[in-house]
Structures are given as structure tokens and as C-alpha cells.
């Protein structure tokens, strides 16, 4: 049985004092999360703080991006070995904001996922379509292309050690949310596509939904058969909301 996962994505928010309150609050309530894996993916400068606050809690921490290069003269980049050195368990790759704002293409996302796996961390591979693509009826083609590019880099064995997050671009930070049935339809398609290659990998693959998930809709979304938890944006910065979302995912 797949263990649910709820991962918070703080994006480019936070400062030391409120971070500490949030992290300590999460750590103090971690005992309530048996049956679900929880993690927070924080900005690079706060990874040390997250690790210090969460190290004894059972809540994992991770990064929102990483360089595809192992090391070298790449000013401003952060390598996978640096993230591993800070105790990260997860790294988000291919988030739509990285794809759309910073021009990260499918092949680069695959290269980053491969680098993360090489350091024994888990990539959270994001896929999702824009509103225009959904209205054009090409959602399945888009998410297939995005996931196939990653599989080309990491293979099915690598996918078996990864997490996939479906995040419809039109529902990220907009207040709009795919209905549980809409989200389930894409998750089922993705799982079916993976199972067509290797059924055992498809059965084991943890798939998250992201896109304006909050306490009020989490239970309905997580109740779908192919949705194993969520990649949570703004709600992960609010202690009570994030705790409620984690509880909603408990198996």
C-alpha cells in the first residue's frame, strides 16, 4: 500500500523568526501524523534552519530546485551534494514556475531528477498543463511528454524511487482547484501510462496533487484512489492549515 505524502512548498517566502515559529509548531504536532509522510521544501537559505528544527520530529525537509551540475564554476547554483549535506530528503524538480518563468525544459527537468537520485534523495517531479492546453484537450499529451522526458533520463528504476506531482498550471496560486474527479482523471491516466510499461512501478508510484489545496478541499482530493497526497503551496505557510491537510491524508 502506498504511504500518503504531503509536502509543503514555501516558494520564495519566509524569514527567520516566523519560520522558526512555523517549524517548531509543526515539530510539536508531528506525532499526529502517523500514517502519512510530511515534508517542507523551503528556500535554500533556510534549509539549515529547517533541518535544525525538524531533525527529531520525523518531518522531512527538502529544496525547491537544484542544479543539474555536480560542482564547478557555476556562480549562484546549488548542487545536489550540498542539499544532501544539509540533510534534504526531497527536491522539487520541474515546477511550472521553473518551467514557465525560468525556461526549464523537459530534458533539463529529467537531468535534475537524475542528479537528485544519484545522491539518494527523492525528486518530486512536477507535471501539468496550462489553461489553454486544457481547453484545447491536450492535457494527456502534455503530461505524457513531460513525464516521458524524465523517464528517458532516469529509467523505470529511477521513477520507482521518485514522486510525481500533478499540478495543473491554471490552479496554482489562483484559488481555482481541479475538482476531485478532474484531478483523479489525470492521476489515473498517469498511473495507467506508467503501469503499461511496468505494472509494479505504477502500483507503487506515489502521486501528489497540487494546485490551491487547502484544508477545506484536501479530504475530498485525497480520497481519490490515485491521489496519494499533495504538494501544498500557500497553505503550507499557515500552521493550522498545513496540519489539517496532513491529517486529511492519513491512510
Image: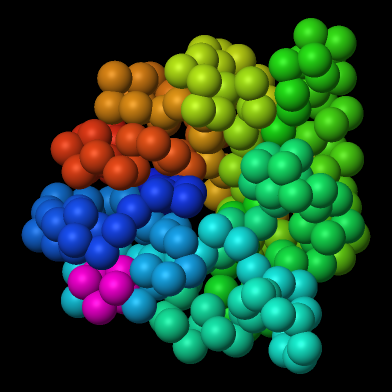
Label total for image: 0
Question: What is the quadrant of residue 131 in the picture?
Answer: top right
Q: In this view, does 27 lie to the left or right of 191?
A: left
Q: Is residue 162 left or right of residue 217?
A: right
Q: From what the image shows, is residue 97 above or below residue 187?
A: below
**Which residue is nearer to you in this view: 240 or 218?**
240
Q: Is 51 covered by the magenta stretch?
A: yes
Question: What is the quadrant of residue 128 in the picture?
Answer: top right
Question: What is the quadrant of residue 127 in the picture?
Answer: top right
For the point 64% across and 68% down, the residue is 66
Question: How far across and how far down the image is residue 77, in percent?
Answer: 67, 75
Q: Can residue 239 be seen in this snapshot?
A: yes
Q: From what the image shows, is residue 40 above or below residue 139?
A: below
**Which residue is nearer to you in this view: 67 or 5?**
67
**Which residue is nearer to you in this view: 242 or 20?**
20
Name the image colouring: rainbow
Numbered range of the magenta stretch: 49-54
For the point 64% across and 21% down, the residue is 170
For the point 45% across and 26% down, the residue is 212
Q: In which quarter of the image is the C terminus?
A: top left
Question: How far across and how far down the image is residue 98, in percent?
Answer: 69, 48
Q: From what the image shows, is residue 197 above or below residue 154?
A: above
Q: Is 245 covered by the magenta stretch?
A: no
Amino acid at each position: 500500500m502506498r504511504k500518503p505524502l504531503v509536502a509543503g512548498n514555501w516558494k520564495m517566502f519566509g524569514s527567520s523568526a516566523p519560520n522558526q515559529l512555523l517549524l517548531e509548531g509543526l515539530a510539536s504536532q508531528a506525532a499526529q501524523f502517523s500514517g502519512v509522510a510530511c515534508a517542507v521544501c523551503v528556500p535554500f537559505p533556510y534549509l539549515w534552519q529547517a533541518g535544525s528544527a525538524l531533525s527529531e520530529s520525523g518531518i522531512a525537509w527538502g529544496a525547491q530546485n537544484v542544479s543539474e551540475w555536480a560542482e564547478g564554476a557555476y556562480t549562484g547554483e546549488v548542487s545536489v551534494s550540498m542539499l544532501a549535506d544539509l540533510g534534504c530528503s526531497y527536491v522539487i524538480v520541474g515546477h511550472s514556475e521553473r518551467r514557465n518563468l525560468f525556461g526549464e525544459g523537459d530534458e533539463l527537468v529529467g537531468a535534475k531528477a537524475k542528479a537528485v537520485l544519484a545522491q539518494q534523495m527523492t525528486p518530486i517531479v512536477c507535471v501539468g498543463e496550462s489553461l489553454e492546453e486544457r481547453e484545447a484537450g491536450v492535457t494527456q499529451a502534455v503530461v505524457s511528454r513531460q513525464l516521458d522526458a524524465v523517464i528517458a533520463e532516469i529509467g523505470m528504476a529511477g521513477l520507482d524511487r521518485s514522486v510525481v506531482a500533478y499540478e495543473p498550471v491554471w490552479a496554482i496560486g489562483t484559488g481555482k482547484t481541479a475538482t476531485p474527479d478532474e484531478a483523479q482523471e489525470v492521476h489515473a491516466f498517469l498511473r495507467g501510462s506508467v503501469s503499461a510499461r511496468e505494472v509494479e512501478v505504477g502500483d507503487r508510484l506515489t502521486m501528489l496533487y497540487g494546485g490551491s489545496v487547502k484544508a477545506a478541499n484536501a479530504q475530498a482530493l485525497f480520497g481519490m484512489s490515485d491521489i496519494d497526497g499533495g504538494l501544498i503551496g500557500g497553505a503550507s505557510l499557515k500552521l493550522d492549515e498545513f496540519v489539517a491537510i496532513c491529517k486529511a491524508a492519513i491512510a
